[in-house]
Structures are given as structure tokens and as C-alpha cells.
Amino acid sequence: MRKFGIGLGIVLAGLLVAIGPSAPPAVGCAVIWRPSAEPVKVAAERALIVWEAEYRTQHFIRAAQFRGGNAEDFGFLVPTPTQPELSEADNAVFDLLEQVTKPREIRTTVIEKIPCCPS
């Protein structure tokens, strides 16, 4: 009976660890707005990160759409290891990326000979 109790205790402890309280999801970027302003939410975003080893440079190309508030009422924070150089990028990079990574459709026809009559 003691072995059963110990085994049950181990199972229950495992379940508590597995389904117990968990940390909230971490969010890397943040939208901030003035307390008196309408809240701003990220409606959609796309990002492309490219590492140029020769120049030891990482390019972070991002397109985002926001809803709520207005352009004067909010900012967007992105954590970076050092102060980045900022510039505008053409959204066409995302169209090109979609074309290059689009799954290819491959169609094949298989014809099997089905024996119909014994010889």
C-alpha cells in the first residue's frame, strides 16, 4: 500500500508541475502611447532579418500596421543589442520574399496496371 501512495504522490506532483502556474508569454516588442490617448495595437506585421557576415551587420526589415490611436500618440520599441542605424525600406522586399519562398505545386499522374482476368 505504501508503494501505491508514493507512486500516486509522484504522479500528482508531476501533474502539478505540468499544469501548474506558468509565466505569461514574453513579448519582445512593445507599443506605447500617452495615458490620455487611445490605445494602439499591432494589427499586422512582417519582418525579415538578414545577417551579412562580411560586414558583421544584421538587417532587420519590418513592416507593421497599427490600429487605434494616431501617429502622434504612440511609439514602437524594439530591443536591440546596440544602437541601430535606421532607414526606410521598400515593401517590395516582402513581395519578393513571398515569391521566393512560395511552395511549389507538383502534380503527378500514377497509372497502375490492374489485373482483371486470371490467365
Image: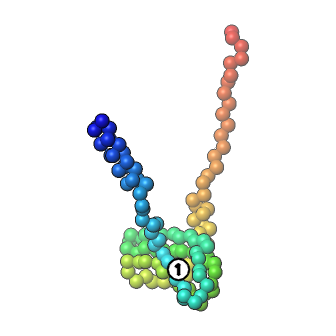
Q: Is residue 102 above or below residue 108?
A: below
Tell me which amino acid carries mark 1: Val
92 horizontally vs 75: left or right: right
Farthest residue toward the left?
2
Q: Is residue 41 above or below residue 104?
A: below
Say which quadrant the N terminus sits in. top left
Q: Is residue 91 above or below residue 1?
A: below
Q: Residue at x 60, y 54 (%)?
A: 103
Q: Is residue 50 visible?
A: no
Total marks shown come to 1
Q: Position of residue 90 (x, y in %)?
A: 59, 77
* Camera-nearest residue between 87 and 40: 40
Q: Position of residue 88 (x, y in %)?
A: 55, 82
* Camera-nearest residue between 81 and 24: 24
Q: Position of residue 38 (x, y in %)?
A: 61, 84
3 horizontally vs 32: left or right: left
Colour approach in the figure: rainbow
SS type, badge 1: strand
Q: Is residue 101 visible?
A: yes
Farthest residue toward the top?
119
Farthest residue toward the front?
1
Q: Quadrant of residue 43?
A: bottom right
Q: Position of residue 58 (x, y in %)?
A: 43, 73
Q: Residue at x 64, y 49 (%)?
A: 105
Q: Residue at x 56, y 70 (%)?
A: 46
Q: Residue at x 33, y 46 (%)?
A: 9
List the residue tagged with mark 1.
31
